[in-house]
Amino acid sequence: MNYAKLITYCKTLPHASWERKWGSTLIFMVERKMFALFILNANDKPIDLWCKVDDDLFLSYTEQPGIRPAPYLARAKWIGMESGAMSDAMAKEVLGRAREIVFSKLPKRTQAALRAQSR
């Protein structure tokens, strides 16, 4: 996986915002609700990717090589992926779905307002 390309992709997702927190983490959010985290090293290079997945797919993802339950967030069905765990195309699908999951859990009124803004 090319983390730089995936970061660029996350920035293009509808209603996505991002910020750096905790010194070494780039966080992607929808309405302040996280859907992906890129862990950065001392040189600001991404070294790990964590994201939300569907509850029913969590175990099947974590059984794959290079994918594990994300520390601290596994109970909320987040996975951590090493750089070679999947192709860029597959990682984009997973990240897009992570954004959709978080968006779908927003209040309906908020969802409607965001959809109206993007028209």
Image (tube, helix red, strand yellow):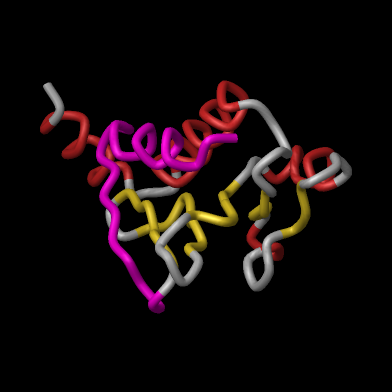
Residue in view at x 38 percent, y 38 percent: 10
Q: From the viewer's side, name the closer residue of 22 and 15.
A: 22
Residue in view at x 52 percent, y 29 percent: 92
- Residue 100 image-quadrant placement: top left
Magenta residues span: 1-23
List x then y, in percent, for residue 89.
Answer: 57, 21
Residue, far front: 43
Q: From the viewer's side, name the closer residue of 55 and 35.
A: 35
List x then y, in percent, for residue 4.
Answer: 42, 40
Location of the N terminus (image quadrant)? top right
List x then y, in percent, for residue 12.
Answer: 29, 32
Residue 27, relative to residue 7: is it above or below?
A: below
Location of the C terminus (image quadrant)? top left
Check if residue 12 falls in the magenta segment: yes
Q: From the viewer's side, name the closer residue of 105 and 72.
A: 72
Q: Is residue 10 left or right of residue 74?
A: left
Residue 78, relative to residue 12: is it above or below?
A: below
- Residue 44 image-quadrant placement: bottom left
List x then y, in percent, for residue 22.
Answer: 40, 78
Residue in view at x 39 percent, y 59 percent: 27
Residue in view at x 75 percent, y 40 percent: 56
Q: Is residue 97 left or right of residue 20?
A: right
